[in-house]
């Protein structure tokens, strides 16, 4: 009789322990899914070098900085953020030629790719980052002056 009572309890306990030891964890948060972006990245094209650096400020904020340097002169720079708020997750780009920072709402995220969107912005309207075998492939998309969709690719490697 005791065997009939103890066997189901023992069976459930063993199954629970196997489940806990199997490495099954809760799903990652959307911010955790993009943690692969946190690094220092560089892209070289001709005499120009572009840099993008991301660091984790908190669980809800990643801060970045991007710049392009040619002939020891900085030709482009922007301050970046990926920030989780009560309204969602946003990519925020602060570029000198814009009167204020521009926000792009998270459109999709996986462990390897993230896309942000702002259809109200002139260009770009979409920003995507993809982890391609440890390298960073980023691209921006949106309409040109003729209304044709333009895509500009950026390829980065981790700084060594």
Image: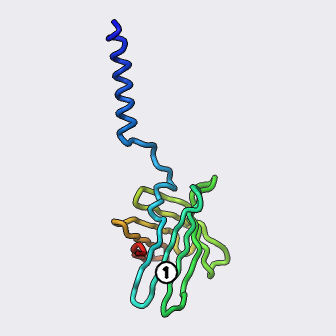
Q: Is residue 120 visible?
A: no
- Residue 48 position, x and y percent, is 45, 88
Q: Residue at x 50, y 87 (%)?
A: 69
Q: Is residue 5 left or right of residue 125?
A: left
Dot 1 crowding, Cα within 10 Å, few <14, some 14–19, many 20+:
few
Q: State the quadrant of the N terminus.
A: top left
Q: Which residue lies under the disc numbered 1?
A: 146
Q: Is residue 3 left or right of residue 107?
A: left
Q: Residue at x 39, y 89 (%)?
A: 46
- Residue 9 position, x and y percent, is 38, 19
Above-or-below relation of 95 to 2: below
Structure colour scheme = rainbow
Counting labels gives 1
Q: State the quadrant of the C terminus.
A: bottom left
Q: Is residue 6 left or right of residue 126?
A: left
Above-or-below relation of 109 to 78: above
Quadrant hosting residue 3: top left
- Front residue of this view, candidates 35 and 84: 35
Q: Seen from this angle, which residue lies furthest right? A: 99
Above-or-below relation of 94 to 130: below
- Residue 23 position, x and y percent, is 37, 42
- Front residue of this view, candidates 108 and 78: 78
Q: Residue at x 43, y 43 (%)?
A: 25
- Front residue of this view, candidates 2 and 66: 2
Q: Is residue 16 visible?
A: yes
Classify mark 1: helix, strand or loop: loop
Q: Seen from this angle, which residue lies furthest top? A: 1
């Amino acid at each position: 009789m005791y065997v009939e009572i103890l066997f189901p309890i023992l069976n459930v306990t063993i199954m629970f322990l196997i489940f806990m030891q199997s490495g099954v964890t809760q799903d990652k948060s959307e911010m955790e899914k993009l943690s692969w972006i946190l690094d220092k990245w560089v892209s070289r094209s001709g005499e120009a070098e572009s840099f993008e650096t991301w660091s984790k400020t908190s669980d809800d904020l990643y801060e970045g900085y991007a710049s392009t340097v040619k002939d020891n002169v900085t030709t482009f720079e922007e301050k970046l953020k990926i920030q989780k708020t009560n309204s969602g997750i946003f990519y925020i780009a602060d570029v000198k030629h814009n009167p204020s920072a521009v926000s792009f709402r998270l459109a999709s995220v996986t462990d390897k790719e993230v896309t942000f969107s702002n259809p109200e912005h002139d260009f770009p309207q979409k920003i995507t980052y993809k982890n391609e075998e440890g390298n960073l492939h980023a691209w921006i998309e949106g309409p040109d002056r003729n209304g044709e969709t333009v895509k500009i690719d950026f390829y980065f490697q981790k700084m060594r």
